[in-house]
Amino acid sequence: MRRIRCNRRVCATAFGAVLAVALAACGGSAGNGSTGAVALSSPQSEQQLVKAANTEGSVVFYNSFVEDQIPPLIAAFNKKYPKIKVTSVIPGSEMVPRITTEQRGGKYSADVIAGSAQDFSALYSQGAIVKYNAPDAPSIPGFSLPSGYRDALYLKSTVIAWNPAALAKAGLQPPTTWEDLTKPEWKGKFSIVANSSGLDFYLSLISWLGHDKALALVKRLGANKPILATSHTQATTGVQGGEPVATATAYSYLAAQFKEQNPKTMDFAGTHPLLTTVDTVTLAKNAPHPAAAKLFIDWLMSHQGQNTIVTATGHAAMGATKENDPTVWNPGKMKATFAQPDVTVDQYNQYTTEYEKALGFNG
Protein backbone atom coordinates (compact mmCIF):
# COMPACT_ATOMS: atom_id res chain seq x y z
CA MET A 1 0.00 0.00 0.00
CA ARG A 2 1.06 3.57 -0.62
CA ARG A 3 2.01 5.49 2.47
CA ILE A 4 2.21 9.19 3.14
CA ARG A 5 5.47 9.94 4.87
CA CYS A 6 6.50 12.81 7.09
CA ASN A 7 9.30 13.60 9.49
CA ARG A 8 7.03 13.05 12.50
CA ARG A 9 6.33 9.45 11.54
CA VAL A 10 8.76 7.82 13.95
CA CYS A 11 7.42 9.79 16.92
CA ALA A 12 3.82 9.02 16.02
CA THR A 13 4.27 5.31 15.45
CA ALA A 14 6.23 4.97 18.67
CA PHE A 15 3.42 6.41 20.76
CA GLY A 16 1.63 3.13 21.33
CA ALA A 17 4.74 1.37 22.56
CA VAL A 18 5.77 4.27 24.79
CA LEU A 19 2.33 4.53 26.36
CA ALA A 20 2.14 0.79 26.85
CA VAL A 21 5.48 0.79 28.66
CA ALA A 22 4.39 3.64 30.90
CA LEU A 23 1.09 1.96 31.71
CA ALA A 24 2.67 -1.42 32.34
CA ALA A 25 5.21 0.14 34.65
CA CYS A 26 2.48 1.66 36.77
CA GLY A 27 0.33 -1.39 37.14
CA GLY A 28 -1.81 -1.63 34.03
CA SER A 29 -5.49 -0.85 34.46
CA ALA A 30 -6.73 2.69 33.95
CA GLY A 31 -9.40 2.15 36.54
CA ASN A 32 -7.24 2.57 39.64
CA GLY A 33 -6.68 6.16 40.65
CA SER A 34 -6.11 5.68 44.35
CA THR A 35 -2.33 5.39 44.48
CA GLY A 36 -1.38 8.32 46.65
CA ALA A 37 -3.50 10.88 44.82
CA VAL A 38 -4.79 13.12 47.59
CA ALA A 39 -6.59 16.33 46.61
CA LEU A 40 -5.01 19.53 47.86
CA SER A 41 -7.17 21.69 50.09
CA SER A 42 -8.71 24.68 48.33
CA PRO A 43 -8.66 28.27 49.57
CA GLN A 44 -12.01 29.38 50.93
CA SER A 45 -12.66 32.01 48.30
CA GLU A 46 -11.62 33.11 44.82
CA GLN A 47 -9.94 36.14 46.37
CA GLN A 48 -7.79 33.91 48.58
CA LEU A 49 -6.93 31.68 45.61
CA VAL A 50 -5.80 34.67 43.53
CA LYS A 51 -3.75 36.01 46.43
CA ALA A 52 -2.02 32.65 46.95
CA ALA A 53 -1.45 32.23 43.20
CA ASN A 54 0.09 35.69 42.92
CA THR A 55 2.44 34.80 45.78
CA GLU A 56 3.55 31.63 43.95
CA GLY A 57 3.97 33.70 40.79
CA SER A 58 4.18 30.92 38.23
CA VAL A 59 2.54 27.79 36.83
CA VAL A 60 4.03 25.02 34.66
CA PHE A 61 1.63 23.75 32.00
CA TYR A 62 2.28 20.36 30.37
CA ASN A 63 0.04 20.18 27.31
CA SER A 64 -0.62 18.77 23.87
CA PHE A 65 -1.44 21.99 22.05
CA VAL A 66 0.40 23.04 18.90
CA GLU A 67 3.28 25.38 19.70
CA ASP A 68 1.83 28.47 18.04
CA GLN A 69 -1.52 28.00 19.81
CA ILE A 70 -0.03 28.61 23.25
CA PRO A 71 0.95 32.34 23.14
CA PRO A 72 -2.66 33.56 22.66
CA LEU A 73 -3.78 31.41 25.60
CA ILE A 74 -1.05 32.74 27.87
CA ALA A 75 -1.62 36.34 26.74
CA ALA A 76 -5.34 36.12 27.52
CA PHE A 77 -4.68 34.55 30.93
CA ASN A 78 -2.04 37.15 31.80
CA LYS A 79 -4.35 39.96 30.82
CA LYS A 80 -6.49 38.92 33.78
CA TYR A 81 -3.71 37.59 36.02
CA PRO A 82 -0.54 39.52 35.12
CA LYS A 83 1.48 38.39 38.16
CA ILE A 84 1.58 34.70 37.17
CA LYS A 85 4.14 33.46 34.65
CA VAL A 86 2.93 30.50 32.57
CA THR A 87 5.60 28.10 31.34
CA SER A 88 4.38 25.79 28.57
CA VAL A 89 5.92 22.33 28.12
CA ILE A 90 4.78 20.25 25.12
CA PRO A 91 6.13 16.69 25.48
CA GLY A 92 4.15 15.30 22.51
CA SER A 93 3.92 11.51 22.62
CA GLU A 94 6.33 11.55 25.57
CA MET A 95 3.73 13.14 27.88
CA VAL A 96 2.98 10.04 29.96
CA PRO A 97 6.49 8.55 30.19
CA ARG A 98 8.01 11.96 30.97
CA ILE A 99 5.63 12.62 33.86
CA THR A 100 6.03 9.01 35.03
CA THR A 101 9.80 9.26 35.06
CA GLU A 102 9.82 12.64 36.78
CA GLN A 103 7.45 11.64 39.55
CA ARG A 104 9.15 8.32 40.22
CA GLY A 105 12.41 10.17 40.61
CA GLY A 106 10.82 12.50 43.14
CA LYS A 107 10.75 15.39 40.69
CA TYR A 108 7.44 17.19 40.45
CA SER A 109 7.69 19.73 37.66
CA ALA A 110 4.16 19.85 36.24
CA ASP A 111 1.39 21.89 37.81
CA VAL A 112 -1.31 21.47 35.18
CA ILE A 113 -1.60 18.67 32.60
CA ALA A 114 -3.75 18.84 29.46
CA GLY A 115 -3.86 15.88 27.11
CA SER A 116 -5.92 13.19 25.47
CA ALA A 117 -8.37 10.89 27.20
CA GLN A 118 -5.81 8.12 26.81
CA ASP A 119 -3.15 10.27 28.53
CA PHE A 120 -5.63 10.90 31.32
CA SER A 121 -6.26 7.17 31.65
CA ALA A 122 -2.57 6.39 31.99
CA LEU A 123 -1.87 9.20 34.47
CA TYR A 124 -4.96 8.39 36.51
CA SER A 125 -3.95 4.74 36.77
CA GLN A 126 -0.68 5.64 38.46
CA GLY A 127 -2.00 8.40 40.72
CA ALA A 128 -0.07 11.09 38.87
CA ILE A 129 -3.01 13.50 38.97
CA VAL A 130 -5.31 14.61 41.78
CA LYS A 131 -8.98 15.49 41.98
CA TYR A 132 -9.87 19.07 41.21
CA ASN A 133 -12.97 20.38 39.47
CA ALA A 134 -13.16 23.92 38.15
CA PRO A 135 -16.38 25.76 39.01
CA ASP A 136 -17.36 25.85 35.33
CA ALA A 137 -16.46 22.23 34.54
CA PRO A 138 -19.14 20.85 32.21
CA SER A 139 -21.21 17.72 32.46
CA ILE A 140 -21.04 15.85 29.15
CA PRO A 141 -23.77 13.29 28.40
CA GLY A 142 -22.22 10.12 27.03
CA PHE A 143 -18.71 10.84 28.30
CA SER A 144 -17.63 9.78 31.76
CA LEU A 145 -14.58 10.49 33.86
CA PRO A 146 -13.86 8.97 37.29
CA SER A 147 -15.49 10.61 40.29
CA GLY A 148 -13.85 13.93 41.11
CA TYR A 149 -12.60 14.58 37.57
CA ARG A 150 -14.83 16.73 35.36
CA ASP A 151 -12.53 19.12 33.50
CA ALA A 152 -13.13 18.20 29.86
CA LEU A 153 -11.21 20.90 28.02
CA TYR A 154 -12.17 20.47 24.37
CA LEU A 155 -13.27 17.82 21.90
CA LYS A 156 -11.96 16.55 18.59
CA SER A 157 -14.25 14.76 16.16
CA THR A 158 -13.20 12.59 13.25
CA VAL A 159 -14.94 13.32 9.95
CA ILE A 160 -14.65 12.38 6.29
CA ALA A 161 -13.07 15.14 4.21
CA TRP A 162 -12.57 15.51 0.47
CA ASN A 163 -11.26 17.87 -2.18
CA PRO A 164 -14.26 19.07 -4.27
CA ALA A 165 -12.12 19.91 -7.32
CA ALA A 166 -10.32 16.55 -7.25
CA LEU A 167 -13.62 14.79 -6.57
CA ALA A 168 -15.23 16.30 -9.68
CA LYS A 169 -12.20 15.46 -11.79
CA ALA A 170 -12.37 11.84 -10.67
CA GLY A 171 -16.11 11.68 -11.33
CA LEU A 172 -16.92 10.66 -7.76
CA GLN A 173 -19.72 11.55 -5.38
CA PRO A 174 -18.92 12.96 -1.91
CA PRO A 175 -18.36 10.13 0.58
CA THR A 176 -20.63 10.82 3.53
CA THR A 177 -20.22 7.50 5.37
CA TRP A 178 -17.22 5.26 5.97
CA GLU A 179 -19.05 2.52 4.11
CA ASP A 180 -18.89 4.75 1.02
CA LEU A 181 -15.10 4.50 1.16
CA THR A 182 -15.27 0.71 1.05
CA LYS A 183 -16.89 0.81 -2.43
CA PRO A 184 -14.82 -0.24 -5.48
CA GLU A 185 -14.77 3.26 -7.00
CA TRP A 186 -12.87 4.53 -3.97
CA LYS A 187 -10.10 1.94 -4.10
CA GLY A 188 -6.75 3.66 -3.55
CA LYS A 189 -8.30 7.15 -3.64
CA PHE A 190 -8.54 7.98 0.05
CA SER A 191 -6.22 8.10 3.03
CA ILE A 192 -6.57 6.97 6.63
CA VAL A 193 -4.47 7.55 9.74
CA ALA A 194 -3.22 4.01 10.11
CA ASN A 195 -0.96 4.00 13.18
CA SER A 196 -1.74 4.52 16.86
CA SER A 197 -2.55 8.18 16.16
CA GLY A 198 -5.79 6.90 14.63
CA LEU A 199 -6.75 4.99 17.75
CA ASP A 200 -9.22 7.69 18.84
CA PHE A 201 -11.09 7.02 15.59
CA TYR A 202 -11.10 3.28 16.27
CA LEU A 203 -12.09 3.66 19.93
CA SER A 204 -14.98 5.92 18.89
CA LEU A 205 -16.07 3.32 16.34
CA ILE A 206 -16.00 0.69 19.08
CA SER A 207 -18.15 2.88 21.32
CA TRP A 208 -20.62 3.26 18.47
CA LEU A 209 -20.69 -0.15 16.78
CA GLY A 210 -19.18 -2.49 19.31
CA HIS A 211 -15.77 -4.12 18.90
CA ASP A 212 -16.50 -6.77 16.28
CA LYS A 213 -18.43 -4.53 13.89
CA ALA A 214 -15.88 -1.72 14.28
CA LEU A 215 -13.01 -4.06 13.45
CA ALA A 216 -14.91 -5.46 10.46
CA LEU A 217 -15.43 -1.93 9.11
CA VAL A 218 -11.75 -1.06 9.52
CA LYS A 219 -10.83 -4.28 7.70
CA ARG A 220 -13.10 -3.33 4.81
CA LEU A 221 -11.48 0.09 4.66
CA GLY A 222 -8.05 -1.53 4.68
CA ALA A 223 -9.04 -3.91 1.90
CA ASN A 224 -9.80 -0.92 -0.33
CA LYS A 225 -6.10 0.03 -0.45
CA PRO A 226 -6.09 3.42 1.31
CA ILE A 227 -3.04 5.64 1.41
CA LEU A 228 -1.62 5.27 4.91
CA ALA A 229 -1.09 8.47 6.85
CA THR A 230 0.51 8.93 10.27
CA SER A 231 -1.35 12.01 11.53
CA HIS A 232 -4.67 13.76 11.02
CA THR A 233 -2.91 16.94 9.95
CA GLN A 234 -0.93 15.05 7.34
CA ALA A 235 -4.01 13.31 5.99
CA THR A 236 -6.03 16.52 5.79
CA THR A 237 -3.22 18.54 4.22
CA GLY A 238 -2.82 15.87 1.55
CA VAL A 239 -6.48 16.11 0.61
CA GLN A 240 -6.25 19.90 0.47
CA GLY A 241 -3.50 19.44 -2.11
CA GLY A 242 -5.62 17.01 -4.12
CA GLU A 243 -3.75 13.78 -3.39
CA PRO A 244 -5.60 11.73 -2.43
CA VAL A 245 -9.16 12.77 -3.20
CA ALA A 246 -10.45 12.15 0.34
CA THR A 247 -9.51 11.02 3.81
CA ALA A 248 -11.45 8.86 6.25
CA THR A 249 -9.77 10.50 9.24
CA ALA A 250 -9.77 14.30 9.32
CA TYR A 251 -10.29 16.28 12.49
CA SER A 252 -13.34 18.47 11.92
CA TYR A 253 -11.75 21.63 13.34
CA LEU A 254 -8.86 21.37 10.88
CA ALA A 255 -11.10 20.54 7.92
CA ALA A 256 -13.27 23.54 8.81
CA GLN A 257 -10.23 25.83 8.86
CA PHE A 258 -9.08 24.55 5.46
CA LYS A 259 -12.59 24.88 4.03
CA GLU A 260 -12.76 28.50 5.18
CA GLN A 261 -9.45 29.18 3.46
CA ASN A 262 -10.54 27.61 0.16
CA PRO A 263 -13.85 25.76 -0.23
CA LYS A 264 -12.78 24.56 -3.68
CA THR A 265 -10.13 22.33 -2.12
CA MET A 266 -11.82 21.20 1.11
CA ASP A 267 -15.21 20.00 2.24
CA PHE A 268 -16.20 17.50 4.91
CA ALA A 269 -19.09 15.59 6.41
CA GLY A 270 -19.72 14.58 9.97
CA THR A 271 -21.46 11.30 10.57
CA HIS A 272 -24.34 10.49 12.85
CA PRO A 273 -23.26 9.89 15.51
CA LEU A 274 -20.15 12.05 15.40
CA LEU A 275 -17.03 10.08 16.36
CA THR A 276 -15.48 12.14 19.14
CA THR A 277 -12.61 12.18 21.61
CA VAL A 278 -12.17 14.56 24.54
CA ASP A 279 -9.00 16.22 25.84
CA THR A 280 -8.93 16.89 29.58
CA VAL A 281 -7.10 19.25 31.93
CA THR A 282 -6.03 18.05 35.38
CA LEU A 283 -4.07 19.07 38.46
CA ALA A 284 -0.74 17.26 38.77
CA LYS A 285 0.17 15.34 41.90
CA ASN A 286 2.37 17.40 44.25
CA ALA A 287 2.06 20.44 41.99
CA PRO A 288 4.79 22.90 43.04
CA HIS A 289 2.41 25.83 42.49
CA PRO A 290 -0.98 24.45 43.54
CA ALA A 291 -2.86 27.74 43.90
CA ALA A 292 -1.66 29.04 40.53
CA ALA A 293 -2.45 25.63 39.02
CA LYS A 294 -6.02 25.73 40.28
CA LEU A 295 -6.46 29.30 39.13
CA PHE A 296 -5.16 28.42 35.67
CA ILE A 297 -7.49 25.41 35.42
CA ASP A 298 -10.39 27.57 36.57
CA TRP A 299 -9.54 30.11 33.89
CA LEU A 300 -9.20 27.48 31.12
CA MET A 301 -12.64 26.15 31.99
CA SER A 302 -14.21 29.62 32.34
CA HIS A 303 -16.18 31.38 29.64
CA GLN A 304 -13.15 33.50 28.74
CA GLY A 305 -10.77 30.57 28.70
CA GLN A 306 -13.05 28.38 26.62
CA ASN A 307 -13.64 31.17 24.12
CA THR A 308 -9.89 31.74 23.89
CA ILE A 309 -9.33 28.05 23.15
CA VAL A 310 -11.87 28.23 20.33
CA THR A 311 -10.39 31.37 18.75
CA ALA A 312 -6.74 30.38 19.25
CA THR A 313 -6.95 26.74 18.20
CA GLY A 314 -10.22 26.09 16.37
CA HIS A 315 -11.02 23.24 18.75
CA ALA A 316 -14.57 22.87 19.99
CA ALA A 317 -14.61 23.87 23.64
CA MET A 318 -16.68 21.81 26.04
CA GLY A 319 -17.49 24.37 28.70
CA ALA A 320 -19.07 27.79 28.98
CA THR A 321 -18.76 29.13 25.44
CA LYS A 322 -20.96 30.17 22.56
CA GLU A 323 -18.08 30.63 20.14
CA ASN A 324 -17.82 27.11 18.69
CA ASP A 325 -18.00 26.71 14.92
CA PRO A 326 -21.40 25.04 14.46
CA THR A 327 -20.02 22.97 11.59
CA VAL A 328 -17.51 21.51 14.06
CA TRP A 329 -19.67 21.14 17.16
CA ASN A 330 -23.35 21.88 17.63
CA PRO A 331 -24.72 19.83 20.53
CA GLY A 332 -28.26 20.85 19.64
CA LYS A 333 -27.99 19.11 16.27
CA MET A 334 -25.06 16.71 16.61
CA LYS A 335 -25.06 13.50 18.59
CA ALA A 336 -21.60 12.34 19.63
CA THR A 337 -20.24 8.95 20.53
CA PHE A 338 -17.11 9.23 22.65
CA ALA A 339 -13.87 7.27 22.85
CA GLN A 340 -13.96 6.49 26.56
CA PRO A 341 -10.90 7.07 28.79
CA ASP A 342 -10.95 3.66 30.45
CA VAL A 343 -8.69 1.61 28.20
CA THR A 344 -6.42 -0.80 30.05
CA VAL A 345 -2.88 -1.47 28.85
CA ASP A 346 -3.92 -4.87 27.50
CA GLN A 347 -6.82 -3.34 25.61
CA TYR A 348 -4.61 -0.55 24.29
CA ASN A 349 -2.08 -3.04 22.95
CA GLN A 350 -4.81 -5.21 21.47
CA TYR A 351 -6.62 -2.34 19.77
CA THR A 352 -3.43 -0.80 18.41
CA THR A 353 -2.20 -4.10 16.99
CA GLU A 354 -5.48 -5.11 15.36
CA TYR A 355 -6.14 -1.61 14.00
CA GLU A 356 -2.73 -1.34 12.34
CA LYS A 357 -2.91 -4.91 11.04
CA ALA A 358 -6.38 -4.36 9.55
CA LEU A 359 -5.04 -1.37 7.62
CA GLY A 360 -1.77 -3.01 6.57
CA PHE A 361 0.40 -0.64 8.58
CA ASN A 362 3.82 -2.13 9.29
CA GLY A 363 5.35 0.61 11.44
Image (tube, rainbow, N blue to C red):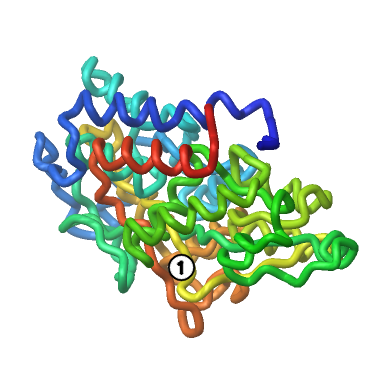
Q: Position of residue 254 (x, y in %)?
A: 65, 56
Report the residue that reaches farthest toward the top.
Answer: 105
* Quadrant location of the N terminus in the rendered image: top right
Report the residue that reaches farthest toward the bottom.
Answer: 332
Q: Considering depth in this image, is 316 or 236 the residue closer to the camera?
A: 236
Residue 20 position (above or below residue 133): above
Residue 243 position (above or below residue 272): above
Report the residue that reaches farthest toward the front.
Answer: 184
Say whether residue 58 is left or right of residue 248: left
Q: Considering depth in this image, is 89 or 174 the residue closer to the camera?
A: 174
Q: Residue at x 51, y 61 (%)?
A: 157
Q: Residue at x 51, y 38 (%)?
A: 195
- Which structural element holds mark 1? helix
Q: Is residue 30 visible?
A: yes
Say whether residue 119 is left or right of residue 272: left
Q: Name the quadrant containing residue 268.
A: bottom right
Q: Position of residue 276 (x, y in %)?
A: 45, 62
Q: Name the quadrant containing residue 183.
A: bottom right
- Residue marked by disc 1: 303
Q: Is residue 299 visible?
A: no
Q: Position of residue 202 (x, y in %)?
A: 43, 52
Q: Residue at x 42, y 36 (%)?
A: 62
Q: Residue at x 46, y 31 (%)?
A: 93
Amino acid type of disc 1?
A: His
Q: Residues within 10 Å of mark 1 (few under 14, many from 20)?
A: some
Residue 289 position (above or below residue 51): above
Q: Position of residue 114 (x, y in %)?
A: 40, 44
Say whether residue 311 is left or right of residue 348: right
